[in-house]
Image (spheres, grey):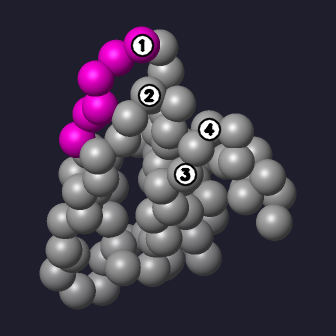
C-alpha cells in the first residue's frame, strides 16, 4: 500500500473488500455536468459547472459498487 493514500484510512475489514482478489475490469462512465459517480461508500466524483461531459475510467475491486447518478439524488442514495 502506498503512504498518503485512502487505503491508510481503512480498517482491515474494509481493506479486504477494496483490494482486488482477481484481475479487475475497467469501467468507464460518461459523466455530464450535474451528475456524479458514487464509488462504494468511499468517495463521490461530481462534475459541476457548465462544462462538457467527462469520461472517467475506474479500476476498482469487483466488490466496490460504482453508481452513476445525479448530484441531487446522491445524498438520498447514500443515506439508504
Q: CA distance from mark 3 to mark 4?
A: 7 Å
Residue at mark 1: 50
SS at circle 4? helix
Residue wearing tag 4: 71
- In the rendered view, tell whether residue 10 sits above or below residue 75: below
Which numbered disc, 4 or 1, marks the residue that appears first in the sequence? 1
Dividing the picture into quadrants, the one containing residue 13 is bottom right
Q: Residue at x 17, y 81 (%)?
A: 23
Q: Is residue 30 left or right of residue 33?
A: left
Instruction: Categorize mark 2 by other alpha carbons within 10 Å: few (<14), some (14-19), many (20+).
Output: some
Q: Earlier in the sequence, mark 2 or mark 4?
A: 2
For the question of whether residue 43 can be seen, the reply is: no
Residue stretch in magenta: 50-55
Q: Is residue 73 magenta?
A: no
Does residue 63 appear to the left or right of 10 in the view shown? left
Helix or strand or loop: what does disc 3 sit on? strand
Q: Quadrant of the N terminus?
A: bottom left
Amino acid at each position: 500500500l502506498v503512504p498518503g493514500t485512502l487505503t491508510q484510512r481503512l480498517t482491515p475489514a474494509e481493506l479486504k473488500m477494496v483490494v482486488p482478489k482477481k484481475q479487475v475490469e475497467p469501467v468507464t462512465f460518461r459523466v455530464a455536468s450535474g451528475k456524479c459517480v458514487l464509488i462504494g461508500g468511499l468517495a463521490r466524483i461530481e462534475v459541476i459547472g457548465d462544462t462538457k461531459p467527462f469520461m472517467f475510467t475506474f479500476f476498482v475491486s469487483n466488490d466496490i459498487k460504482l453508481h452513476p447518478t445525479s448530484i441531487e439524488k446522491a445524498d438520498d442514495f447514500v443515506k439508504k
